[in-house]
Image: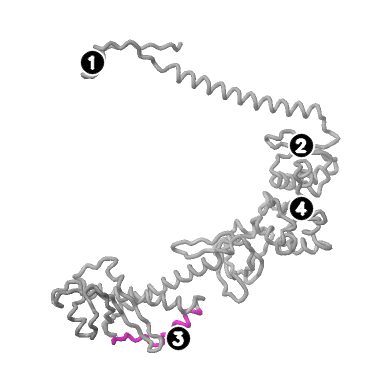
Amino acid sequence: MTLVSLPGLRVTIDEISQRYNLPSSAVEEALREALIKGYEKFRRSKDRNEEFSEEYFDNFNVQLDIEEEGFQILTTKVIVDISKEQIEDRDHQIALSEVQEQVDDSEIEVGDSVLVDVTPEQKDFGRMAAIQTKQVLLQKLRDQQRKLIQEEFKDLEDTVLQARVVRFERQSAIVAVTSGLGQPEVEAELPKREQLPNDTYRSNSTFKVYLKKVRDTPHRGPQLMVSRATAGLVVELFSNEVPEIEEEIVRIVAVAREAHPPSRHVGVRTKIAVDTLERDVDPVGACIGARGSRIQAVVNELRGEKIDVIRWSPDPATYIANSLSPARVDQVILANTDDKQSLVLVAEDQLSLAIGKEGQNVRLAARLTGWKIDIKDLDKYDEEEEMNKWADQAATEAAEITEEETEQEVASKIETETQPEITDVPDSAIADLEAGEETEITVKSDFT
């Protein structure tokens, strides 16, 4: 039995296992695949005149010997009933007589497969084959690592992970995350667009992130894309802080978040609508907690972000009024239910609060409810004038629709009526047409 020596094989496998956070079995599998590629390189350089197909070495495999610290190359050959000299494909076939010389087994038959040792001599394996083995091993280790990371984190998408800043690349922060207690850290990318303006990212600073996507890129390997700006982070933070949400007593109906305000003078803000089917439970109070302890924990994690927790309602008017919190609303008029347009009346001292700094409050309320919200001063509101305005707007839209339909009808009529009608074609004209000769046909059109 030939054995190519690999001194320190056991120690090498353990070191690679620790460095790449891979089990020893995965490292051994990667090493076997790499050695096969090294053997393939050895054979191609040795037999330069022979052409090998891509599948030629599929029946070869490596057997590692951890105790003896070496490896063997084995191949599976099919027994054929011809002489040894007549065999052309010596890597895949072996003569029956040759097998019988080596193995004393009367049950061996033509067509059976046998495992044959084809391990090259230590000195013959070559420097180029060793280099090829090392290159392939590194690639296989990366592939194994990518596969394990994908399997480990795929089920954790749309959840919150603890992150630690490792370094910075361009405008992205590279953070280390872990899938659980005692598990090794894995790097994830926090792009600029997913960062919060009120966050301070320093090396080794820690915070919670939302795992948006586990994606696989051919050149860069697995990438964990995390976020601090998504609304899902607020939802998950509340779910972790409020047991009633985890137990599905309180449910989060909608969330609207502005993580990147249009101006640096406007802070990050979120509105979250909650509801419950339990009569004795206050969903807003459950989210706020005793003395604001629960919501304060979320606010602290989000570095002082403003969060409005409001009560969801099946009645659109009530829901819209609640969504404009902390402003007090006097009246909500559902001006156009089809287009979801509403008019909100507030007192003069509540007008700026309802609109919010640079329109942020009303903008978030509109996104939360799905309604267009127009806010008016109650004292300056003229109901008749406003109704006329809505009526004129509706009439204008209806006229535009009618005009468009009329244009389509005219276009359709032109297309239909300008098609010429061919009538009374004599048999002689048809015969001329079939013969490829010129003839005259009367064409009748009624369009004027």
Callout 4 amino acid: Leu
Callout 2 amino acid: Leu
Residue sitting at x 62%, y 74%: 181
Q: Nearer the viewer, mark 3 or mark 4?
A: 4
Q: Image quadrant for the N terminus?
A: bottom left
The answer to which of marks 2 and 1 sits earlier in the sequence is: 2
Residue 251 image position (x, y, % from top left): 72, 55
Q: Which mark is residue 343?
A: 2
Q: From this viewpoint, which residue is outermost toward the bottom?
A: 68
* Disc 3 to disc 2, C-alpha distance: 74 Å
Q: Examine the rendering and report whether any part of residue 302 can be seen.
A: no
The answer to which of marks 2 and 4 sits earlier in the sequence is: 4
The answer to which of marks 1 and 4 sits earlier in the sequence is: 4
Callout 1 amino acid: Ala
Q: Nearer the viewer, mark 3 or mark 1?
A: 1
The residue carrying pointer 3 sits among few (fewer than 14), some (14 to 19) or many (20 or more) residues within 10 Å by Cα, namely few
* Disc 2 to disc 1, C-alpha distance: 75 Å
Residue, disc 3: 11
Q: Which mark is residue 431?
A: 1
As drawn, is 369 to the left or to the right of 62? right
110 shown above or below 155:
below
